[in-house]
Image (tube, rainbow, N blue to C red):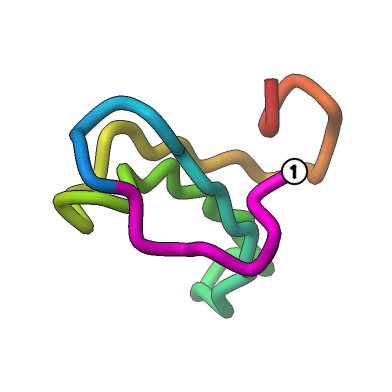
């Protein structure tokens, strides 16, 4: 859909997300981050002890 163009010209046109996991004292914590590709600002983030579809959605 982006045709390898990851540099949109206006904010809020294209968002991307990423999921990573972090080791903590109590076990693994999953982190998802939503980024505006124009401004490269974090729009939203969320953590959870389980990787579920709710973490992404």
Q: Quadrant of the C terminus?
A: top right
Residue receiving disc 1: 1
Residue drawn at x 52%, y 63% is 5
Q: Quadrant of the N terminus?
A: top right
Asked whether 26 or 5 is in front, the reply is 5
Q: Is residue 9 found left or right of 5 in the rendered image?
A: left
Q: Position of residue 11 (x, y in %)?
A: 20, 33
19 relative to 13, above or below? below
9 relative to 12, above or below? below
Q: Is residue 36 found left or right of 57 in the rendered image?
A: left
Asked whether 20 or 2 is in front, the reply is 2
Q: Main secondary structure of the magenta part?
A: loop
Q: Position of residue 45 (x, y in %)?
A: 38, 39
Total marks drawn?
1
Q: Position of residue 6 (x, y in %)?
A: 47, 63
43 relative to 54, above or below? below
20 relative to 49, above or below? below
Q: Position of residue 14 (x, y in %)?
A: 44, 37
Residue drawn at x 60%, y 40% is 48
Residue drawn at x 80%, y 44% is 51
Q: Quadrant of residue 15?
A: top left
Asked whether 47 or 11 is in front, the reply is 11
Categorize mark 1 by other alpha carbons within 10 Å: few (<14), some (14-19), many (20+).
Answer: few
Residue drawn at x 15%, y 51% is 39
Magenta-highlighted residues: 1-8
Asked whether 16 or 54 is in front, the reply is 16
Q: Is residue 16 found left or right of 3 in the rendered image?
A: left
Confirm whether the magenta stretch covers residue 19: no
For label 1, the SS is: loop
Confirm whether the magenta stretch covers residue 2: yes
């Amino acid at each position: 859909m982006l045709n390898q163009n990851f540099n949109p010209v206006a904010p809020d046109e294209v968002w991307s997300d990423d999921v990573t996991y972090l080791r903590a004292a109590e076990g693994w914590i999953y982190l998802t981050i939503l980024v505006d590709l124009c401004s490269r600002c974090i729009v939203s983030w969320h953590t959870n002890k389980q990787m579920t579809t709710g973490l992404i959605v």
